[in-house]
Amino acid sequence: MHEEVAISVQNVSKTFRIPHEKVTSLRSAAVGVFSRKRGYEEFKALDDVSFEVKKGEFFGIIGRNGSGKSTLLKILAGIYQADKGKVKINGRISPFLELGIGFNPELSGRDNIYLNATVLGLTKKQIDEKFNDIVEFSELERFIDQKLKNYSSGMQVRLAFSVSIHANREILLMDEVLAVGDNNFQSKCLTEFNKYKDMGRTVILVTHSIETVQRYCDRALLLRNGRIERIGKADEVGNEYIYQNMSDEEKRILDEVKLSEKYILSNRDESASQEFVKITDVKFLDKKGKQKNIFSSGEDIIFSVSFRYSNYDDSFGARISVESEDGHYLFGYDTFSDNFKIKRDKKEFSLRLPENPFLSGKFYVNVSLFDHNMKPLDFKPRADKFQIFSLASSSRCKGFLKLNHDWE
């Protein structure tokens, strides 16, 4: 193994057996042994995974739930054994994988520091020397002699992380459990990671936070269904993950789109003799005219509205407005104010929003039709919804919209 490589993973695979039925007695277990019917299914958590992490590198591992991230980290920590492949570790590891591992809830915070640090390989003399620093970093001075079972989950995270970071191991493994802590403590931990890097130590971080990966990691690995989809620069891998989520979300809400289209159609039965103007369809298009419900921030969005009418000869106008998922009104435009005339023979009109300013989130569109006296003809509140994903450049913006601005 090369001296500059901290972790080498070669062709690692891991499969779990998931039982179909819960065994509740010895008799059930004995019957199961002789049963021809297999009482479990196999789940391949990792499939031929290979990569290397250099010493002093901040390396992110991302992917959706069930992609194999935590399984991979536990194999690196030695908790799981790989079914196939090899893992080589060049240095001592300090794992911080799951809340509560190595802790005893009946013991005080003080006793748990000694217990957990001993598990990580520190001697009593070393723990004595580091004890005050561990407590100070955890910010739990007032509670250190209380039993751990009385700690909140956030307090337990503080204590566990503080012990791990002071173990002075060459490699630190971190799972998503850090997300339990409050924002200030997370920021404090990330600052500590940078100190770790400056000391030439290695950090492996599993997280769903793309912002954290793109801001702090040198490189990242994207897992999907147990296989490596991409490995490389953190910005590029993070954006690939976002695009994948967009595609997955598009497929997921396809049925919702179909249902919403049915919802948009009028429930009333108009006869040929009645006067009416009705909204029949609302959809979202990209600049190429492709229908979709998932967009990137800054991408063109076209709100397209179809309508039908009977025995209605007067002109009419339309209003399209957008609101956030939790009901905040963002903006609205109407055809009369913008001097746009709807052509009834086309039976369709659209509002184009070039380079949409939305930040990540889900949004609803409201559509209404009205006559020249502003009398309502038809109204479809929350006629359909669309979703926005923001890439790295927008990840630190707050609110609903990203507006062009300059500081002077």
Image (spheres, rainbow, N blue to C red):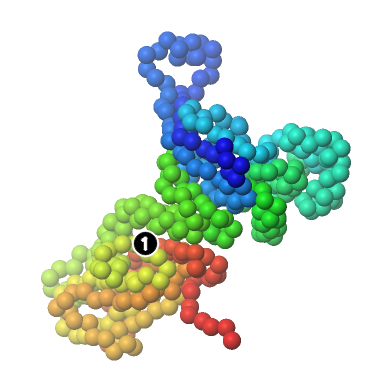
Which sits in the foreground, 374 or 119? 119
- Observer-nearest of 310 and 234: 234
Image x and y of residue 333, in percent: 36, 81
Q: For mark 1, what is the residue?
A: 294
Please report the residue visible at 60 percent of the width from the left and 51 percent of the height from the top. 57
* Residue 36 picture quarter: top left
Horizontal arrangement in the rendering, residue 319 relative to residue 216 (left or right): left
Residue 167 in view here: yes
Q: Which amino acid does label 1 sit on?
A: Ile
Can residue 96 be seen in the rendering of this structure?
Answer: no
Classify residue 353 by image quadrant: bottom left
**22, above or below 185, in the image:** above
Residue lying at 29% horizontally and 79% vertically, measured from the top left: 318
- Looking at this view, name the residue that lies furthest to the front: 2
Residue 316 vertical position relative to residue 364 in the rendered view, above or below: below
- Which quadrant does the N terminus fall into? top right
Q: Quadrant of residue 227?
A: top left
Place of residue 113 in the rendered image (x, y in percent of width and height, measured from the top left): 79, 40
Instruction: Say whether residue 127 is left or right of residue 81.
Output: right
Q: Where is residue 110 in the image (x, y as percent from the top left)?
A: 83, 41
Q: What element carries label 1?
A: strand
